[in-house]
Image: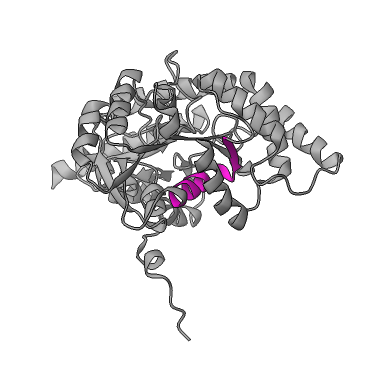
Amino acid sequence: MSIRIADTVREIPRSGIRDFFEVVQTMGDVISLGIGEPDFATPWHIREAAIYSLEKGRTGYTSNLGLPRLRRTISDYVYDHFHVRYEPLSEVLVSIGVSEAIDIALRALLNPGDEVLYHEPCYVSYAPSITLAGGVARAIPTYAEDNFILKAEAIEKAITPKTRVLMLNFPTNPTGAAMPPEELEEIAAVCIKHDIVVLTDEIYSELTYDGKQHFSIAAVPGMKERTVLLHGVSKAYAMTGWRIGFVCAPVELIEAMMKIHQYSILCASIMGQEAAVEALERGEQSMVSMRREYELRRNYIVRGFNDLGLECFRPRGAFYVFPKISTMGLSSREFSLRLLREKKVAVVPGSAFGPSGEGHVRCSYATALDQIKIAIERIGEFCEELRVSEAAA
């Protein structure tokens, strides 16, 4: 018997990251700059909050929207960090990470054929999530020459009568680019003019460097009512495996998203939600300490790639660099596969993040500095061998 798979699912490609790391899994002694998660364990006081929750027997369901206490904490946290006030019991929903939040937001917003604009290179799930929700994904390329920021003029040129949503992710995975407030204000003006809803994935917002403060488009006057702010504790608080994200949005959209959430997920785990309360209320010091370490690593790895002759944009946020490798005469996938096999260093081909990412590789610096130093040495040896080989050809 042959089981018929839905056309939409069958036509979606597998994740370029996961396919690549299937190869990594078959090898030993690999230094991985490929994984997008902190190498720190969740701070102990946060783990303790989950342990106490278990000890008290708090093991059941919560409200579909999430624990009221967590939603109040999220409301206060978002106000303190993004300067936008959301009503905790009607404008906040706790999700299974930002990934689920993106899925249910798109499904709540889109009718078949509605267009969604997003900037590229971008996280691998955006275009498939749009397709699965019945929408049409339309990428807007960004470029290293512009520090990978998204221009309002480019958005306006891409808008059609079917454009319904704009997706943003700053600081960005995979480039680490962050948007200046004045650029976001220009984008906001375009969205208001054309009546477009903004989905803004701000999961890396706390990991903003050089003493800069993150700025959310939701804080621009006139934007709160047309913005879906997506966030969570995974990256800044080293809590990827807890799968706690959240959404702040207008009441009617939260109600629509909650319907999908309650029929598919019910609720996030109560232990994770208890831990998230602790992270958001008392985790600031731990988060700042980890951010300081990431910034040191960023400075080292950017300098390392540029010293090797691989032009590397200096990211303002997240924990990725996106060096240009096109000068080495290989595609990003060929470069990554050969680097892995010949030097046992894992990076992610830029093509995994859309056609605009070709010519680059993504390297995560959420790994220990001593490992990064060895990886840079090995990449240097690899590039030198490629240059010698090319010169002899």
* For residue 157, side relative to residue 31 (left or right): left
Which percent across, then down, holds residue 251? 54, 37
Observer-nearest residue: 103 or 321?
Answer: 103
Observer-nearest residue: 338 or 248?
Answer: 248
- Residue 341 appears in the picture as rendered: yes
Q: Which residue is drawn at 33% across and 50% down?
A: 338
Looking at the image, which residue sits at the far front?
252
Q: How is the image coloured?
A: one colour
Looking at the image, which residue sits at the far bottom?
1
When asked about the image quadrant of residue 159, the answer is: top left
Residues drawn in magenta: 91-107
Observer-nearest residue: 12 or 166?
Answer: 166
Which percent across, then down, holds residue 239? 61, 36
Give the overall secondary structure of the magenta segment: helix
Observer-nearest residue: 83 or 146?
Answer: 83
Q: Residue at x 51, y 51 (%)?
A: 28
Numbered circles on residues, count: 0
* For residue 275, side relative to residue 26 (left or right): right
When asked about the image quadrant of residue 376, the answer is: top left
Looking at the image, which residue sits at the far right?
56
- Residue 29 appears in the picture as rendered: no
Query: Residue 105: within the magenta?
Result: yes
Which percent across, then down, holds residue 354? 30, 47
Which percent across, then down, holds residue 203? 49, 33
* For residue 9, side relative to residue 312 (left or right): right
Query: Residue 152: within the magenta?
Result: no
Q: Which residue is drawn at 60% across and 27% down?
A: 75
Above or below — where is 161 with respect to 320?
Answer: below
